[in-house]
Image (cartoon, rainbow, N blue to C red):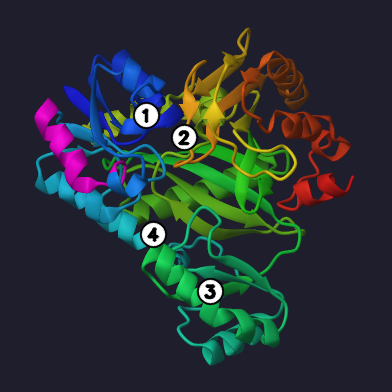
Amino acid sequence: MFRKVLVANRGEIALRVIRACREMGILSVAVHSDVDAEAPHARFADEAVCIGPAPASASYLNVPALIAAAEVTGADAVHPGYGFLSENAEFADTCARCGLTFIGPRPEDMERWGDKVRARAFAKELGIPLMEGSAALRDTDAAVRAAEAVGYPVMLKAAGGGGGRGMKVLRSSGEVRRVFAQARNEAIAAFANGDLYVERFIEEPRHIELQVLSDGRGRVVVLGERECSIQRRHQKILEEAPSPAVSEELRADLSQTVQRAIRDSGYVSAGTVEMLMDERGQMTFMEMNTRIQVEHPVTELVTGIDLVVEQIRVAAGEPIEFPTEHAKPRGHAIECRINAEDPVTFAPRPGRITEYHAPSGPWVRTDSGVMAGFRVPSAYDSLLAKVITHGATRDQAIARMERALAETVVGGIPTNLPLHRRILADPDFRAGKLSTRFLERLGRG
C-alpha cells in the first residue's frame, strides 16, 4: 500500500480523498494555489504545498509544479480527483515516468475513451448499444451529409469535449452551415482538437450512467446506475441512485453488457459509462468517464462501497474483495449540488462566506470544501458542497433531503438552494418524470 498520496485537486473532492487516505493509514499531501491557502483541503491534509497563483493554468494544471510537490514531500502516488488533470493521459504518463503511481486508469485507457469519436467506435466493438451518429467531421459539407444521413434534429459535439461543453442542437442544414466553422474553432481553443461529430438528438432523454470498478485481475463489478437527468446547460444539478426509470430486468441486462465490455477492454480502475434513454426506453452509449464522478456518493450510500478507497486499493495492485451482492442497490440516495451562484441568472457569485452550517442527522451526508470565513475564489468552479441523503424508499430520501436543505445555511453569498427546494417540491420530480429538459419545464411553471 502507498505511504503518502498527493491530491492533485482542490475543494470537496480533495478533502474527500484526504479522508479516505486517513482511514487507510496513508499520509496525504494537499496542493493549493495562493488564494486557497486557507481552504479546508489545505488545512486538513497532513502536509500542504503552494503550487502557484490563482489561475488554474499556473497551479492546479501546472504539471511541473505538481510533480515537484510530490517529489519534495516524498509522495509515492497521485490522486487527481475529478476535473483538472483527472483525465489527462499525458499527466498520468508523466507521473509514471517520475516513479509516481497515478490513482486512476492507464494513459492508454484515457486516450481510448477520451476522444468521443474513438470511444463510440470502441463501444460498438464491445457490444454496447450505440446512438446513430457519424465519424469525425472536419468540414462543413461532410457535416451536412452526416446530419442528413442521421436525420434532423442532430446534436453537434466536440470529439475532445466534456462537461457539456461544445454541444449544439441543429435542426436544418442551414444551421449546420452557419455554426460548423465556429464550433470547430471553439473545439480547437477549448480542447486542442477540432474534430466534431453528430448524433441523433433526443428531445426528452434521460441521462443514466453506470458505475464500474475493475481491478485488472479479472474482477469487474458494475455498481448499479445513477439518474443524472436534472441538468442546466448540460451541467448536472441533482443526481440519484437508483434511477426510477430502470427496472430490475433492464438493470441486470445493462450491468451484464457493461461488465462484459469493461472486462474485454482491459480497463482498470473506477469509471462511468454514460448512457441516454430515449422516450421509448431504449438505452444507447454516450461516453465513458475515466475518473471518479462528482456524484459518486449516491452509489456509495446505496451499496456501502467506498469508491475512493477501492480506487486507491486497485491502484496499489490489490484485488476487489467485497461480495457481488453489494453491487445491488439497497434503498435510495439523492445528491444536491450546492453552488455559489445567483438563484435567478445562475451566474457564479464568488465572495466571502460569513456563516456556514452543513446539515447532519440520520442518513444525511455532506461533502463540503468550504467553511465560515472562507472566500470562494472566482477562478474555479462554483461548487461549494454536496448534500446527500439516503432512505429505504425514494420518497423517504426526498423527505430527508428537504429536511437537510432546511438546515443548510450559507451566509454572505447567494446559492442555488432555492432551486433545489423547487425541484424537490415539483410533482413531476416526485413522480420520477424526468428528462434533461426538466429544468426548462420547471422554469416555465
- Closer-to-camera residue (165/144): 165
Instruction: Compute the Cα span from label 2 to label 3.
Output: 29 Å
Counting labels gives 4
Residue 306 pos. (x, y %): 42, 24
Residue beneath label 1, please?
A: 36
State the SS at label 2: loop
State the SS at label 3: helix
Residue 174 pos. (x, y %): 69, 87
The residue carrying pointer 4 sits among few (fewer than 14), some (14 to 19) or many (20 or more) residues within 10 Å by Cα, namely: many
Residue beneath label 3, please?
A: 183
Q: Which quadrant of the figure has residue 247? A: top right
Q: Nearer the viewer, mark 3 or mark 4?
A: 3
Q: Main secondary structure of the magenta part?
A: helix
The residue carrying pointer 1 sits among few (fewer than 14), some (14 to 19) or many (20 or more) residues within 10 Å by Cα, namely: many
Q: Name which residue type carries label 4.
A: Gly
Residue beneath label 2, please?
A: 377
Q: Name which residue type carries label 1.
A: Asp
Q: Name which residue type carries label 3.
A: Ala
Marks 1/4 in contact by CB < 8 Å: the verdict is no
Q: Is residue 162 magenta?
A: no
Please give the name of the residue rendered at 73% of the width and 55% of the height, measured from the top-left corner: 281
Q: Which residues are magenta?
A: 59-73
Residue beneath label 4, please?
A: 114
* Badge number at residue 117: none
Instruction: Compute the Cα span from label 3 to label 4.
Output: 19 Å
Q: Earlier in the sequence, mark 1 or mark 4?
A: 1
Q: Nearer the viewer, mark 3 or mark 1?
A: 1
Q: Residue furthest top?
A: 361
Marks 1/2 in contact by CB < 8 Å: the verdict is yes
Q: Earlier in the sequence, mark 3 or mark 4?
A: 4
